[in-house]
Image (cartoon, rainbow, N blue to C red):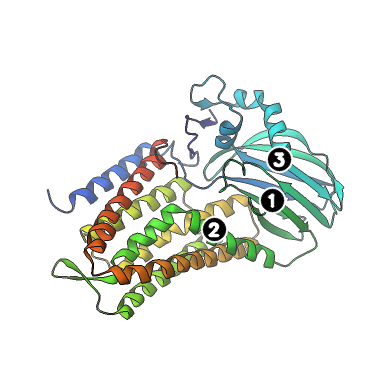
Amino acid sequence: MLFRSNTSTQRKQANDPRNQFTCLRCVLVLTLFGWHSCTNQAHAHKPSDSYLKITGGGEQLAVQWDIALKDLEFLIGLDTNHDGDITWGELKSKRESIADYALDRLEMSADGIACNLRVAELLVTQHSDGAYAVLQLEADGPGDATLIEINYDLLFELDPTHRGLVLYNNGSVSSTHVLSPNSRMLELRTSDTSLWSTLRDYIWEGIWHIWIGFDHILFLISLLIPAVLVRQQGQWEPVEAFRPASKEVLKIVTVFTIAHSITLWLAVMEYVTLPGWIVEATIAFSIIVTSVNNLWPVLPLSGWMIAFAFGLVHGFGFANVLLDLGLSSAALAVSLFGFNVGVELGQLAIVLVFLPIAYALRGTKFYELVILKAGSVVIAIIAALWMIERIGNYAILPF
């Protein structure tokens, strides 16, 4: 078995393998049980990606395209006997369908001459979020081409969060690029040693990742909700001035940034690597904890301390993607740094919208009952459903 599918095509990870505390304890037990029982069949909730690796320097361009089996199952159907498992035999039997579908959505040219793409070999590999089909392509383009043009259109019509991650390497120059629905064409200049384009691309991807990353948004909001309140004699009371609230928010955003930086540095140096499913399940768990803590402050930590502790885990969320690319140290460092900067800019945009509204409403019953209490309950429920999805191979929510 290469991949276990279901009707929702959820991701599968195949890597190595009483009182106010009641709710939190139950969640912890559920999480530990889920992690233990799913060690060999856990799932990542990472956005859909494919990996296009182009190697120059030889007589001809060498192209490798890794596409997730979960995406191919959704697009063309690989599980022919509908038993929930995708085998090597089923994958091989769909080779022509895979080639036709994929190559209809990828065009390349080298120095202005169109490349005739052909699938030379079909293989399988593992990335941080599961099994991928590997298309070894013959491109008949000159290996010393100075300009490679790519037109990429895989999955964009069905999944606007999908990204095509491009890695070019010719032995002396290495660069990485991101293809998205708003940037489907890439002019790749192979003699360009500047990392600016990589930095620019990943700053934007960081911003976009926050704006479409509902889990990151809900984690941030669950931390910001009590920022305009102060705990007095077991009750939340509104802060008297904007400055204390803004200082608390500044602490939260700053330590979250620091936590991201630490995590990304560790990932770049490969001192710490975590399976994608553990990262994504823990992100969901962090949202539950912060939301429950808004209702019953069971953690002996302030908001910025919680932001730092869980920010370390959130920072791994995108690192696995870049590590899967096999980037050089310089390109990986620039990509991670740019993405982290983009994440912080995306967070700042959310803060600038949320904080003035929260401050204006902080002393009202609406804020207490709807934003603080009902809002925290809703966020906790959504996060609990995400956690079940990510460790149990279910599709419950449409986002």
Whether 346 is drawn above or below 26: the answer is below
**Considering only vertical position in the picture, is 209 above or below 200?**
above
Q: CA distance from mark 1 to mark 2?
A: 16 Å
Classify residue 41 as left or right of residue 137: left
Q: Amino acid at mark 1?
A: Arg
User: Looking at the image, is mark 1 or mark 2 earlier in the sequence?
Assistant: 1
Name the residue carrying label 3: 105
Which residue is label 2 attached to?
A: 208
Alpha carbon distance from label 2 to label 3: 23 Å
Amino acid type at image mark 3: Arg
Q: Residue furthest top?
A: 81
Residue 82, image x, y percentages: 51, 21
Q: Secondary structure at mark 2?
A: helix
274 horizontally vs 363: left or right: right
> Would you call the spot at circle 2 few (<14 residues within 10 Å), some (14-19), or many (20 or more)?
some
Closer to the N terminus: mark 1 or mark 3?
3
Dot 1: few (<14), some (14–19), or many (≥20) neighbours within 10 Å?
some
Check if mark 1's residue and mark 3's residue have beta carbons within 8 Å.
Answer: no
Residue occupying image coordinates x 15% and y 66%: 234
**96 to the left or right of 275:** right
Q: Is residue 178 visible?
A: yes
